[in-house]
Amino acid sequence: MRNKSSLVLVLLTIFLFIFNLILLYFFGEKLNRWSGFISIFLFFIYFLSQPVGSRKMLVFFISYLIGDFLLIFYENPDLRNIAFGFRAISFLVLAAMVFKRMQNLKLDFSGILVLVIACSVNFYLLHVLIDITPNTPGLDTFEFIFYAYGLSVILSVVASISYQMRYASKASFFFVVGVISLVLSKLSYYIGYYLEYNYFFLAFVFFEIIGLACLLNYLQKKPVESTSLI
């Protein structure tokens, strides 16, 4: 049953790659927002069909779906602010999924160095993204929400890397790849939108689909360290 479920996930991932790339090529970025939302919804349906349940993953998908739907109307500043609020919730939920598994985590110098570098890079990127945002009405409110969103992203990245260093299992590998891929997808879209680099939308499609597929794969692995904490 698990092998069949994994095959379905692989086929769904491949299909969504092709589906999104075709729409992006022929219709551009705005229609690609809808295709991205449809992709997340199909992954959500796949998640609901699985015997392995997870309340936190359910909250993640719901908040991620709402945020992605609202971002279809990105040019509306109020909806954009709400969307980033839901995105912040989704990344905080990801961090919460593995937080209890890191209670006895002991880091050596190399581990601390990795976390410091990860935090520094993320803080720098957060500052750069704010700088490239055009000065529009309501920018102060957006900056506040965006910084809150950025901090939630940093927390999820730190949690996922710490989780991988603590267990170094297949489950932790899929989790850290999933989280980082979602972060890169949002970074790619933001750069592509404001700097009008269309190739970044290709990266957005790639990383978002890979990220969600990896998180679902993580859930299927049933981490042996503490399945009750998912």
Image: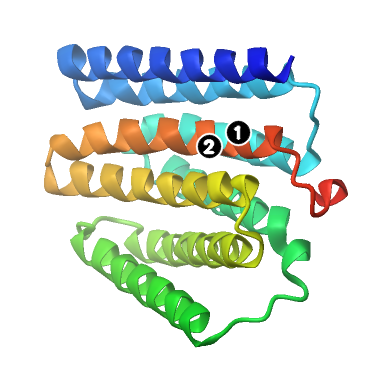
- Residues 20 and 116: in front is 116
Disc 2 marks a residue whose amino acid type is Cys
Disc 1 marks a residue whose amino acid type is Asn
156 vs 173: above or below: below
Residue hosting label 1: 217
Please indicate, yes or no, whether residue 181 appears anywhere in the rendered image: yes
Q: Please tell me how crowded label 1 is: few (under 14), some (14-19), or many (20+) other residues with Cα within 10 Å.
A: many
Residue hosting label 2: 214
The location of residue 46, given as percent across then percent down, is 64, 18
Task: Please name the residue shown 47% across and 48% down the image.
Answer: 177
The location of residue 155, given as percent across then percent down, is 55, 66
Q: SS class of the residue under badge 2?
A: helix
Task: Please name the residue shown 47% across and 61% down the image.
Answer: 145
Q: Are marks 2 and 1 in contact (CB under 8 Å)?
A: yes
Instruction: Kindly report the distance in space between the C-alpha atoms of the residues bearing marks 2 and 1.
Output: 5 Å
Quadrant occupied by the N terminus: top right
Q: SS class of the residue under badge 1?
A: helix
The location of residue 210, given as percent across then percent down, is 43, 34
Q: Please tell me how crowded label 2 is: few (under 14), some (14-19), or many (20+) other residues with Cα within 10 Å.
A: many
Q: Is 87 positioned to the left or the right of 207 in the image? A: right
191 vs 163: above or below: above
Q: Is 60 positioned to the left or the right of 188 in the image? A: right
